[in-house]
Image (tube, helix red, strand yellow):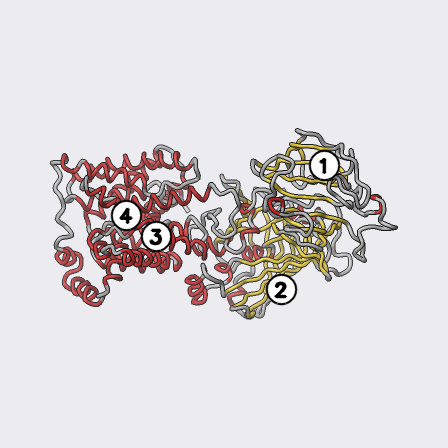
Amino acid sequence: MTKKNTAGNQILSSVLNSYSQVFFSTSKTLAVFLVVISFFDYGAGVGGLVAVLVANTLAWGLGYNKYYLRSGLYGFNALLVGLGVGLYYQPSPEVYVLVAVTAILCFFLTIVFQGVLGKYGLPFLSVPFLITIWIVALSANSLQALNLSERGIFIYNELYSLGDKQFVDFYNFLETSIRSSFIRIYFHSLGAIFFQSHLLAGIIIAVGLLIYSRITFTLSVLGYGVAFLFYQLVGIEFDSLGYTFIGFNYILTAIALGGYYLVPGRASFGWIILLLPAVVLITTSAQQVFLLFRISPYSLPFNAIVLTFLYALKLREKRPHYLIETPVQMGKPEKNLYLYSGNTKRFPAAYSVSAALPFFGEWTVSQAHNGEYTHKGAWRHAWDFIITDRTGEQFCNSGDFAEDYYCFGKAVLSPADGTVVEVINNIPDNTIGDVNTKDNWGNTIIIKHSEYLYSKLSHLKFQSIDVKTGDALKRGQLLGKCGNSGRSPYPHLHFQFQASPHVGSATLDYPLGHYLQKEDNGYLQKSFEFPQKNQVLVNPSKNEVLDKALHFIPGRRINIKVEVDSKNAKWKKLAGEFTWIVETDVYNTTSIRCEQDNAVAYLYNQGDMHFFTNFAGRKHSPLFWFYISLFKVPVGFQANSQIKDSLPVHLLFSGILKYLQDFVAPLFLFLKADYELILKESGDIISQDSVKMEAEITKRIAGKMIKKSTNEIAINSAGDFDISIKTEDAKLKILCRNELD
């Protein structure tokens, strides 16, 4: 591809995305629909296009962020202003000079609000458009050289100019067929977002939304429908929306909060139902106020509610489990949902710190959250750990002495990187059965991990602590030894998270990061979960082969050879040789890209866990099979351990089933793709020079398995992968060899 073509594609993308961004999208298909309907009124269409070109040219010429430029974020506010001005006045050179001037003003307001609201992690929405269009509207009486437009009064004449009698007849058919005022005003409200006053524009936008995203379309109907019901409930004249076209506020609010800024789900849909009445009240009251100035409130209600709600969510002290802000915007509600909803634990954005177990070896949870003896009220989110033998006993001999207990004197480790903020080291250990209620917590260490996350380890052995206040710690660093000090009748380790640095602070409901839970037939990998009473836990030890192979350094090149045994032509196309390159972008996102087909697999490595986060490109490709085979791999492994996860639905399913799933996805998933990785126990398969694993990918519909693949993975000390994949109709072998310097 030439530089000229690349530049041309970027310009085209920035223009088209400026249109689709009005609906929080970068869909080129949706953009084409919107461009077409914007030219139903040629004055508005030309005005919008001129404004976009002016704003994007400024962004490019002045050196602003290229990502925002390409995604249309610098252009969509100017587009709305251009549409409004182009519709309000008769087309003329003077009008388009005004459009250019207002586009410049709107662009700089966009930059300002991007900076001001961005400090609080908030979007600027259509605030720049509001201010600019109000300035134009309030200046209208002074713009004597411009003629007000009379378009929109004689709609049939305008439609005739667009498509002759056939077009008029078609529109007339729509008008006579759609008699419900509810449906008619819904379409009018959609069209009004692009300053179009007739029914057909709204219908075309609705079709574009449906093709682009089923969730977005559903939300548009939900937001509008809830507003309609509230109008009926409180007795507001709903038909007024038919000529004020202010109903788009309800549609945009629902789309923004229900599926874009929040991961779509039952919680986000529920809050749409709760918030829309407030949007109605702001809309009706704003209309009365702005009537005094003879201007419209336009999208003010939408901006007010969305910004207020998003800001309020950011002030929450407790990490949410249901109403989740989209960590990384995928540009489509379905992708946001399938990647994050119901599976947020696997992503590092869900929790700021991945905390390890604070000990070596196998320990048993003797008391978990909401314990039987302590761990009550404000201190309920804590764990007590002990060591037990095969019979479940925690001591040998008579158990009358602290030294009889297996955990007494064992090493206690830092659960994560941090700084020591409190040390108590002078409390004598109790005799067995006695407690020290005066010095309740006994010998204690408190570690600061982040601004609002601290860990506390208590009941340590008398004068065993090897660190002091102010020391910087690394994860796994020795702190001291398990003891029996404070309110401790028998030796154990008390461990909790808290939001403040003080001894006696209330506990915080925060999970452990990655650990292994002992099962009858091996170990089960757990990620960001809460251990329960009597569970036996162990910290996985890092495997050097896995650590090296899964450490994808930018610039690393991997040569791929694919062998296929299948009668199916689709599979045979995979055979051949490929080259993969490890890359990173300005946001430090690491990915593997195939040079031949530009497929990209995005990944993250926390040091103790590798996982792929997303995939873009041709799904039926060697890189895609590599992606699902190594979807989630712990760097630390115990022999015969396993890990389970769920693969994103939109990457494993397609066609009508996926289309139907999109509609109901925020409520429930009937499609599922299970991922299970097993380190097989078969001789000496885990050593310092090789690792063998097996991944099973199972596709299910309503719980019933429909397809399954078994992926055997062998990794050697050089970091090379041999992956053998067996499906119902093919056998695939992917040989991955690191390219030598």
Label 3 or label 2, whichever lies nearer to me, is 3
Amino acid type shown at disc 1:
Lys
- Judging depth in this view, the residue of 373 and 78 nearest the camera is 373
Q: Percent position (x, y) of residue 479?
A: 73, 36
Question: In this figure, which residue is indicated by the disc labeled 2?
Answer: 710
Q: Which residue is mark 4?
A: 283
What distance separates the C-alpha of mark 3 from that of mark 1?
Answer: 54 Å
Mark 3 or mark 4: name the one nearer the start of the chain: 3
Q: Residue tagged by mark 3?
A: 276
Q: Quadrant of residue 238?
A: bottom left
SS at circle 3: helix
The crowding category of the residue bearing disc 3, from other C-alpha atoms within 10 Å (few below 14, some 14 to 19, many at least 20), is many
Badge 4 amino acid = Thr
Q: Which tag is nearer the camera, tag 4 or tag 1? A: 1
Secondary element type, mark 4: helix
Q: Nearer the viewer, mark 3 or mark 1?
A: 1
In front here: 356 or 53? Answer: 356
- Measure how far apart labels 3 and 2 are at the Cα level: 48 Å
Q: Nearer the viewer, mark 1 or mark 2?
A: 1
> Which circle's residue, 3 or 1, is located before the other in the chain?
3
Quarter of the image for residue 299 reads: top left
Which dot, 4 or 2, sits closer to the camera?
A: 4
Q: Are marks 1 and 2 in contact (CB under 8 Å)?
A: no
Q: Is residue 634 visible?
A: no
- At label 2, which amino acid type do we have? Thr
Badge 2 element: strand
Q: Disc 1 designates what residue?
A: 438
